[in-house]
Image: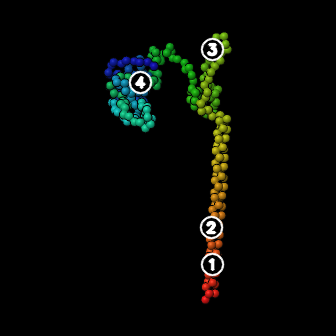
Amino acid sequence: QKTIEIEDEKQLRAFYDKRMSQEVEGDVLGDEWKGYIFKITGGNDKQGFPMVQGVLINNRTRLLCKKGSKYYRPRKVGERKRKSIRGCIVSHDLSVLNLAILKKGDADVEGLTDEKSAKPRRLGPKRANNIRKLFNLSKEDDPRSVIVRRPIEREGKKSYSKAPKIQRLITPDRIQRKLKWKAERRHRWEKSRAAAKEYNALVAQRLKEERERRQSYKEKRRSLSRKMSEKKAKAKAGAA
């Protein structure tokens, strides 16, 4: 990372009306940047407001931000707030413009691309796909064989090395574990389905028994009422 101050307005005109993530050739900054290609990654204006990707204006505006918005952290549940942010288009009132080098040019730049400023990567990638991408491996190759190890040397003691735990690594154990979880979920589903079927059968049986009991009770009432009516009719006939 290096900060470069540019006073010439003509050199900066090539960046005007460019959006974030667009590429700019480095020849506009001078012969020392010949062959370089830059990518605009952001910037700040003179008051310190940052550029935000997706806001297609070249000045400052106030947006209603909520949870998940960039450059805003809500303090309460459901809180929203208007905040001043700058659009993603480069204009003349920026004080800082952040650039990333996509392609190195012919000459080295002191403190940026020369050998003295080059620092070896202390830690390698941790995710399995990133390790494959770094070493150009296929999906069948094992990333554990090429992981970047960090040597640890101590005076008077045995030296050893450390390596990160690989994340999202698909191994036979992982596949077997997922098959086990899937089988357990299916077993729980079949068990609950069988229990529900048994419960519904029991409820249907209870309803049937209740209907039969009520029907039997109604038939008994009808029979008793019929007998009482016949008895009364006989008593009236005898009295006559």
**Horizontal side of residue 34 vs 229, given as left or right:** left
Q: Nearer the viewer, mark 4 or mark 2?
A: 2
Residue 160 position, x and y percent, is: 65, 18
Name the residue rendered at 57%, 24% in the picture. Answer: 124
Quick one: label 4 or label 2, which is nearer the N terminus? 4
The residue to which callout 2 is attached is: 214
Mark 4 Cα within 10 Å, few/some/many (few <14, many 20+)? few
- Mark 2 and mark 1: span between their CA atoms? 21 Å
Contact between marks 2 and 3 (CB within 8 A): the answer is: no
Quick one: label 1 or label 4, which is nearer the N terminus? 4
Quick check: 221 above or below 198? below
- Mark 1 and mark 4: span between their CA atoms? 106 Å
Q: Is residue 61 visible?
A: yes
Q: Nearer the viewer, mark 2 or mark 3?
A: 2
Quick check: 121 above or below 195? above
Q: Of the numbered discs in the image, which one, if any, rests on residue 163?
A: none
Contact between marks 2 and 1 (CB within 8 A): the answer is: no
The amino acid beneath tag 2 is Arg
Under circle 3, the secondary element is: loop
Contact between marks 4 and 3 (CB within 8 A): the answer is: no
Quick one: label 1 or label 3, which is nearer the N terminus? 3
Residue 8 position, x and y percent, is: 33, 19
The residue to which callout 1 is attached is: 228
The amino acid beneath tag 1 is Met
Residue 35 position, x and y percent, is: 43, 22
The residue to which callout 3 is attached is: 153
Under circle 2, the secondary element is: helix
The residue to which callout 4 is attached is: 98
